[in-house]
Amino acid sequence: MELAAKLKAAGFAPEQAEAVVRVVVETQTSVVTRDYLDARLSENKVDLIKWTAGMLLAQAGLVAALVRLF
């Protein structure tokens, strides 16, 4: 625990330093990395483009069918 040693050297009580280190470690486990976030956003973007293109084709087919019908 290098951070705890630095905090103790800065004047923190040993209990306080260890508590701060525990909080920092717990917080870091729930932090999302930029690479992970970029990858997830890219996946969602591809899915959205696929869905939009599919709906556009379906709409064009429906319009063509209605034009032929009338």
Image (spheres, rainbow, N blue to C red):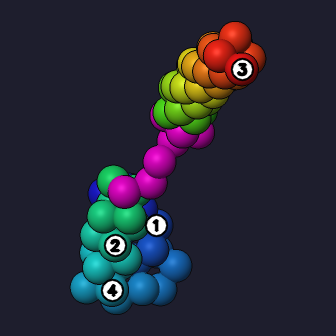
Q: Mark 4: which amino acid?
A: Gln
Outermost residue toward the front in this view: 70
For the residue carrying disc 3, how many other residues have a C-alpha within 10 Å: few (<14), some (14-19), or many (20+)?
A: few
Residue at horizontal 34 percent and vertical 73 percent from the top: 23
Residue at horizontal 53 percent and vertical 32 percent from the top: 44
Question: Dot 3: what SS?
Answer: loop
- Label annotation for residue 70: 3
Which is in the foreground here, disc 2 or disc 4? 2
Q: Mark 3: which amino acid?
A: Phe
Which is in the foreground here, disc 1 or disc 3? 3
Vertical placement of 33 versus 64: above or below? below
Q: How far apart are marks 4 and 3 (CA)?
A: 79 Å
Residue at horizontal 69 percent and vertical 11 percent from the top: 68
Query: Along the polypeptide, which appears first: circle 2 or circle 4?
Result: 4
Q: Are marks 2 and 3 in contact (CB under 8 Å)?
A: no
Query: Along the polypeptide, which appears first: circle 1 or circle 3?
Result: 1
Vertical placement of 19 versus 30: above or below? below
Q: Residue 45 appears at what percent x and percent y?
A: 61, 29
The residue range painted magenta reads 30-37
